[in-house]
Amino acid sequence: EREVIGIGTTKSPGRIMRAFGTSVIEKSKAGRSLKYAFYFTPENRDDVKVLLKYAEVRHIDFMMPVYMHVVDGHEFLITHPIPDDDSYYRGEDIAIWTDDPAIARAMSEMAQKIWESGTPATVDSANADMMVPLARPRRSKGIRSPTMVCTIDPSTPPKAPAVHRATSRLR
């Protein structure tokens, strides 16, 4: 394996580290490219911060109802967590795996496009804030807009859009 791309639900960051944490750490140390994309929420923020130590993680602006994993464009796995909870071993999860070249290649291209459309996240180790641009950076002659540091305000109701839940300060 050289590259793994995972696109998942809001619960996926925690499930990945609890179920595959040892493997993720080993593959990261071995130099494998690990790329993940999720819709970030206040609830998954700490799990995303842990995953960021070992993989490139991006915020996507929509919620995925399933979890997709593509390995080197040769294998594809999709799981539907029932229920979408924190457990990686309980429940009625449904999964489909294939190594069919046409399907794996097509799903790999789709996963790559979703991952590329996401906004990169980083961790500011000085004050342990997870940093995500509130809007997708604009590129003009190679210049990118500044990154915002987002802190989640727990007093805001969870149904509010993410932009309204976040306060920001320029980095």
Image (cartoon, rainbow, N blue to C red):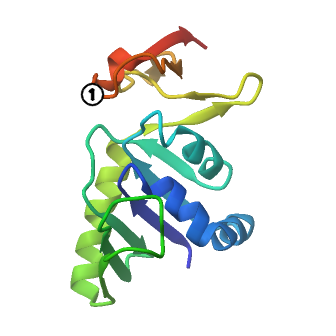
Near mark 1 (Cα within 10 A), the count class, few <14, some 14-19 or many ≥20, is few
Task: Tell me if residue 4 comes above or below residue 92 in the rendering.
Answer: above
Task: Tell me if residue 49 comes above or below residue 96 in the rendering.
Answer: above
Res. 157 image quadrant: top left
Q: Position of residue 14 (x, y in %)?
A: 53, 55
Res. 81 image quadrant: bottom left
Q: Position of residue 122 (x, y in %)?
A: 59, 35
Judge from the rendering whether residue 86 lies leftward or rightward of residue 111; answer left or right.
right
Task: Tell me if residue 22 comes above or below residue 6 in the rendering.
Answer: below
Number of numbered discs visible in the structure rendering? 1
What amino acid does circle 1 point to? Lys
Judge from the rendering whether residue 128 lies leftward or rightward of residue 9; answer left or right.
right
State the quadrant of the N terminus. Answer: bottom right
- Which residue is at a point 39% across and 72% down the rendered structure image? 70
Q: Position of residue 155 (x, y in %)?
A: 44, 16
**Along the viewing direction, whichever of 85 and 128 lies nearer the viewer:** 85
**Along the viewing direction, whichever of 148 and 142 lies nearer the viewer:** 148
Q: Position of residue 86 (x, y in %)?
A: 47, 59
Element marked by disc 1: loop
- Which residue is at a point 65% across and 48% down the rendered structure image? 50
- Which residue is at a point 22% across and 84% down the rendered structure image? 102
Task: Tell me if residue 127 comes above or below residue 168 in the rendering.
Answer: below
- Which residue is at a point 38% across and 76% down the rendered structure image? 73
Residue tagged by mark 1? 159
State the quadrant of the C terminus. Answer: top right
User: Residue reaching furthest top?
Assistant: 169
